[in-house]
Amino acid sequence: MQPAFNPPENGHYAELLCPSCGGQYQHHYRIEVFERDEDQDTGVHIIVEKGSATIDQNLTGNPSMRRHGLNIYFGCELCHAYSVLSIAQHKGNTYVDFSPTAKPT
């Protein structure tokens, strides 16, 4: 689904809206970074969550089929839904997607 934003104030700081209820009170709780050379099977995967970072080479969950990707996980304060904002690079294009995800464990 396409991300939605409140209009930015003075051209800055547009608020990302919850894909479930349209609310603006979301908290990100996990960030994943995927880095690899074009079409490579291996690369670097970094997770930042709960005050620590882990690094491995597991590219499962990379939103890009060919290159770099980024996942930012959110929980909505209003409706308690969980979602992930994904940014993917593919053949020089950058794609953005917002989708529901499971509650974190």
Image: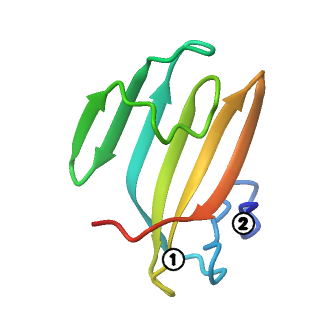
On the picture, is 89 further left or further right than 29? right
Instruction: Evaluate whether residue 76 shows in this view.
Output: yes
Quadrant in which the C terminus appears = bottom left
Q: Pointers 2 and 1 in contact (CB under 8 A)?
A: no
For disc 2, the marked residue is: 5
Q: In x, y percent, where is residue 32?
A: 42, 42
> Which is nearer the eye, 35 or 4?
35
**Amino acid under disc 2:** Phe
Q: Specify the quadrant of the image occupied by residue 29.
A: bottom left
Q: In x, y percent, where is residue 60?
A: 45, 37
Instruction: Evaluate whether residue 13 shows in this view.
Output: no
Query: Dot 1: within a 10 Å radius of its alpha carbon, few (fewer than 14), some, or many (20 or more) residues?
Result: some
For disc 1, the marked residue is: 25
The residue positioned 48% from the left and 30% from the top of the image is: 34
Disc 2 to disc 1, C-alpha distance: 12 Å
> Which is nearer the eye, 53 or 57?
57
> Which is nearer the eye, 62 or 78?
62
Q: Specify the quadrant of the image occupied by residue 54.
A: top left
The residue positioned 57% from the left and 27% from the top of the image is: 68
The residue positioned 70% from the left and 47% from the top of the image is: 96
